[in-house]
Image (tube, grey):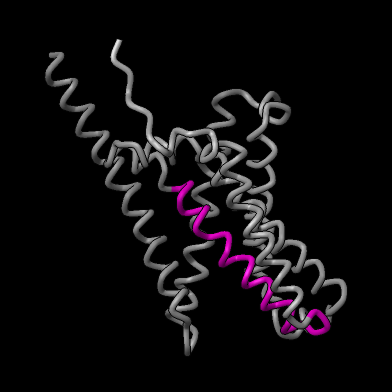
Amino acid sequence: MNRRPKTLLDKPLFNDWALYAWISVPVSLVMVWGMVVGNLRSGPGISELIQLSVRLSIPWLYLAFAASSLQVLFPGAFSRWLLRNRKIMGLCFATAMGWQLLFILWMVILYSDYYANEVYVFTDLLEGVVGYAFLMAMTITSFKFGRRYLSSGSWKLLHKCGIYALWGYAWLVYWYAIFYYESPDAIDYLYYLTGTLAWGLRIAAWVTKRRRQALRTAVAS
């Protein structure tokens, strides 16, 4: 039997929990450094840390969102590795967003006036609550102890709806930053464009699978 040759990406050091450590530890160290050099005694200072945590989380969300599409469109060592570690990418995203939740609660509890007057928008709050509900449910059910409470169909539905909801919320944040803020940052454009690309890959992969299925049906008939 011919076996696929091993690549660097097949090594245990770059997969599963080792990969999680490679990503989540630096992310957490950056957040700790942000706390050291930032201003934790003001609402604007906490707001900057919230923004930092989001910017550190987005790449892992987009990679998890695009993993299956890349495997369909560009099968190879990298796409196999990414699909194999899609759960890890999602957990890295959840870790970074855990930092965001910490600082949101910090602001609401300690700087409630700043939050009420400068940050609070009902639609943002509603979208955030829905996003965190999906994220927590997806995180818990990524492990056996949580997954056992769902049927296979329910688990797939939760994770499919959840990844689309989280991608959509993140993409809209940067869409809004570009088209409504006066001076968007370069990273706003980067995350808006890469989020759009991730969506485009999903569409292209769907079309590709439909064409392949139609071809197989035609050949079989």
Q: Which residues are magenta?
A: 40-65
Residue found 47% across the figure and 81% down from its top: 185
Task: Report the quarter where the C terminus lies.
Answer: top left
Please determine whether, in this image, residue 115 is positioned above or below residue 10. Answer: below
Please determine whether, in this image, residue 219 is positioned above or below residue 98. Answer: above
Q: Describe residue 25's horizontal placement relative to residue 107 as left or right.
A: left
Q: Describe residue 189's horizontal placement relative to residue 38 as left or right.
A: left
From the top left corner, tell me how far across and down residue 175 is, in percent. Answer: 45, 72
Counting every numbered tag in the picture gives 0
Task: Report the quarter where the N terminus lies.
Answer: top left
Q: Describe residue 30's horizontal placement relative to residue 115 as left or right.
A: left
From the top left corner, tell me how far across and down residue 62 is, in percent. Answer: 46, 54
Q: Is residue 121 magenta?
A: no
Residue found 73% across the figure and 82% down from its top: 45
Q: Describe residue 99's horizontal placement relative to residue 220 as left or right.
A: right
Q: Is residue 63 magenta?
A: yes
Q: Quadrant of residue 91?
A: top right
> Which of 70 and 209 lies nearest the eye of the viewer?
70
> Which of 171 and 43 lies nearest the eye of the viewer?
43
> Which of 90 and 204 lies nearest the eye of the viewer?
90
